[in-house]
Image: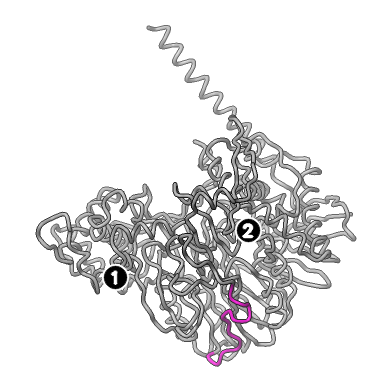
Amino acid sequence: MRLVKWLVIYLTLGLAVAGLVLAAVLWVTGLRSLPDDNDSVRLPNLSAPVTILFDDKGIPTIRANTMRDAYRSLGYLHARDRLWQMESMRRIGAGRMAEIIGKPMITYDILMRELGLYRQAEAQLVLMDQSEKDDLQAYADGVNAFLTQHDRPFPIEFQLTQFQPEPWTVADSLVWGRLMSLQLSGDAFREAQTAALIGLLGRDKAAQLMPRHTKSLATMNDGNRDGWLSQYDASNAWVLSGARTESGKPILANDPHLGLNMPGQWYLARIETPELTLVGATAPGVPMHILGHNGKIAWGMTTTHADTQDTITLDQRSLDSATTRTEIIQVRFGDPVHIVVRETDFGPAITRLGSTPRALIWTGHSDRQRAATALYQLNRAQNWQDFLNALSRFDDPAQNVFYADTKGHIGMKVVGSLPIRAPGQNGTVPLSLFDDPWHGVVPPSELPGLYNPVSGLIFNANNRIITDAYPYLITDRFPADYRAMRLKERLAETPKNHRLEDSMSIQNDIVSTAAQRLVPLFVKAEPNTEQAAEALQLLRDWDFSMDRKKAAPAVYMTLLNETVRVLAEDDLGPDAFKAFWRADADFVELALSQAPTWCDDIRTTPVESCKWALSTALDRAVFGLSQKQGNSPSDWRWGKMHTATMKHQLLSLIPGLALLGNRPIETSGGDHTINRGQSRGGEDDQPFAHIHGAGYRAIYDLNNLNNSLFALAGGQSGNPFSPHYSDLMKDWRDGRYFRIPGRAEDIPEHGGALLKLTP
């Protein structure tokens, strides 16, 4: 026995030592992978030397003789700072992640092969002008120059997965747009769920789970609201004419909301050439600026939430007549997987749409997409007409694009292909083969838009952007109007003297309009314990700000989550309910104020009241909070529950390395605040983790665009060992902004670095 004991001790020590050695190797390798900002590098095919000046945040100002040289340089920088992010992006789009990760990625690869996103990216090249192709190729050449010329180890992700990246291609850049289009498109993957709800509850009651309200909002009419099956994709934007600003020139503010990860979606850059200046957010892997300004105009985007997808149930004849191709998915540590992809007359057959064979009808499923060309030309637009001409090529996804220029004009245009559905169809449930297919798409000239409105104001928080008179269906359910109502209220505070600081304050606003509506209903609960009474008093005394340091937001969100459970679990049944459960303010507001039959527990004989439902939910909420944060409600804090997890998508999966890659941070805000801190709700281990929000904020000053302000969740680098991996995180969380250098005073005397690229 003593021998066994000593063997165990030696083995344990041996494993510990091996682990420490591995950690030390990874640490040293990781540090060696960091680039030197003060350096001189040869970059093939430059027409002249390029200088790249970094500020103290790692944001580059690229000064080049031509835009082609600038694109080549940006490709080099993207690869240098975000190589793993670029690699995983192109592999996800091509359905090739299983080659390096193995079996867990097979189902995702199958979906991407069926969608054919990479094939569409390749097909876009045929439609491009030669100069655009050459610029995209220059960017790819810059990426490849880094891959072949660097003398340091690749970042840690490549060390862990033990593979070398392939050369970058133009199609690799274009597939980013196809992935974003898929993310920001309609509700195809929810249609079967909606149909199941209708089958379970009946059409009228199912509609109450997806409330529809109409409310007028200044230059737009806020209409149908997506309740139960809401999407996470969202954004805020507003643009004010000079008549409403202190400077007399427009201000455009924009904060797109996407998933919060490490590294973030955006890489900030300034490009200066004799022909063009570009400043703002780029996407690693893509040469164009997605959001920003070019010295003459500024632009921003919000998601239209257009329903551009439908599914159709197929019969055997449809499957038999489909065009097929066989694709092979290589699997690391496993056998190759052979799949047959079927292209029907309606679109690709998608296995993830359920066991019933269904095809996807999608405006984005086309070999003639020109969104990349639209962005390329948008970067060069000098006025409103140039802006419209560029966006006329923007096929997908549907977006609201905001505009302002230095001459004082403002505008907004909806872009993208919107399907024209047959009368009676609303796109919420799968079609049958007997249904009438789409009748083309809405002509670009008939898409909604505004130019220099008399009000001097255009704003959107993903609410409805059309009036009832608009002849086409954009979607059956727009998101809730909570953010839009608060945005309208805040913008009304400065009708004539709006400043950049005012837009900063609005972007960071954490007052919840949803809470303002719901708390008066919640406090009707009957507390059964002293703790519950204290929790209700916290709500009564609350100012409705979702402050991470306060207890009331924790009570509110936990009570909201539990109220949904009390109202709906009995109607749906426990299994179906778990699939739909989230902290849904829209549904709860409707149920408590207009449809109290939801308060009755249909599993019991007596008819329960809404006071009973709220009291039951309150007991559950207080119990849950006590378990996690102690018995004193005044000590509870929203921030303990509402943490932006900021996970590294690979390192977070590896025990021990999650500490290296993840950068969790407590945040304020919530699901329905302008400073949006979206969570999942339901029964997740962390139901209120902040998983989705404004990873990028920008406020463009058209009086002097060099005064424009920015904030970024995370940092410029994707390398966890870099000082710029997460150095901007706390400023982003706390509402502090910076300028992207365009003025000498924006680069500290000793805070910058200079990278020289020579032919």
Mark 2 or 1, closer to the camera: 2
Give whichever of 723, 146 is nearer the camera.
146
Name the image quarter holding the N terminus: top left
Magenta stretch contains residue 333: no
Q: Quadrant of residue 406?
A: bottom right
Q: Quadrant of residue 528?
A: bottom left
Residue at the farthest front position? 317
Magenta stretch contains residue 448: yes
In this rendering, position of residue 163 left or right of residue 128: left
Q: Secondary structure at mark 1?
A: helix
Residue 722 in sight from this viewpoint: no
Residue 321: x and y in percent read 59, 51
Label 2 amino acid?
Arg
**First reached walking from the N terminus: tag 2 or tag 1:** 2
Q: How is the image coloured?
A: one colour
Residue 178: x and y in percent read 63, 58
Could you tell me which residue is drawn at 36 percent across and 69 percent down?
Answer: 545
C-alpha distance separating marks 2 and 1: 37 Å
The residue where tag 2 is placed is: 178
The residue where tag 1 is placed is: 589
Give whichever of 652, 300 is nearer the camera.
300
Could you tell me which residue is drawn at 67 percent across and 36 percent down?
Answer: 29
Q: Main secondary structure of the magenta part?
A: loop
Residue 757 in sight from this viewpoint: yes
Residue 538: x and y in percent read 25, 66
For residue 167, above or below residue 366: above
Q: Quadrant of residue 544?
A: bottom left
For residue 364, above or below residue 628: below
Give whichever of 34, 693 is nearer the camera.
693
Residues drawn in magenta: 441-455
Label 1 amino acid?
Glu
For residue 321, above or below residue 234: above
